[in-house]
Amino acid sequence: MTWKRAASTKDFEKKSGKEVNLDGNRIAIFRTNGKFYAIEALCRHQDGSLAPGKIDGEVVECPLHSWHYNIRTGDLLDYLEGVKLKTYKIDLKGKDIFIDV
Ligand code: FES
């Protein structure tokens, strides 16, 4: 368990995403419904970055070909069964967002 500072809460609009690279791990952080989530950044279809994807509640849509993932569980919600992105624990300390990588 290694907690790393990943971003500031000030970097996020109310509903937005941002990609960070921590120790070579590309991670997408999302803010939605007043909470923060962190998942593996790359879509399993063709490695599109999910961070700029459209967010609807706990669902993000890949900007390239519209696959949908639950950003709390990492589950792919359409097309294939059993596909799951890695999720990361988040800790907020003031305005700093820490991720357990
Ligand atoms: S790369 Fe994400 S849907 Fe194709």
Image (cartoon, rainbow, N blue to C red):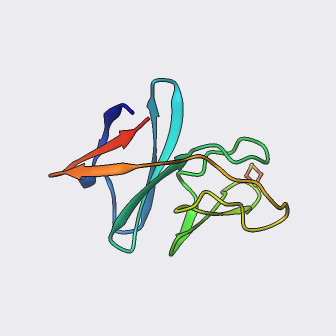
Q: Is residue 21 above or below residue 62?
A: above
Q: At x 50% / y 75%, what residue is drawn?
A: 57
Seen in the picture, residue 3 relative to 75 is either above or below; the reply is above
Camera-nearest residue between 78 and 48: 78
Picture coordinates of residue 17 (x, y %)? 45, 55
Q: Is residue 31 left or right of residue 96?
A: right
Answer with left or right where residue 81 lies relative to residue 54.
right
* Left or right: 42, with 44 as reference point: left
Q: Position of residue 4 (x, y in %)?
A: 32, 33
Figure quadrant of residue 1 = top left
Q: Which residue is located at x 64 percent, y 49 percent? A: 85
Residue 89 appears at what percent x and percent y? 41, 49
Q: Quarter of the image containing the C terminus?
A: top left
**Residue positioned 69% across, 53% down in the render:** 84
Give me the residue at 36% from left, 31% from top: 2
- Number of marks drawn: 0
Residue situated in front as seen by the camera: 74 or 67: 74
Q: Is residue 19 left or right of residue 13?
A: right
Q: In this view, which residue lies farthest toward the front?
A: 1
* Residue 100, x across and y down, in percent: 39, 39
**Residue farthest toward the left in the current orientation of the protein:** 94
Q: Nearer the viewer, residue 13 or 80?
A: 80
Q: Quadrant of residue 65?
A: bottom right
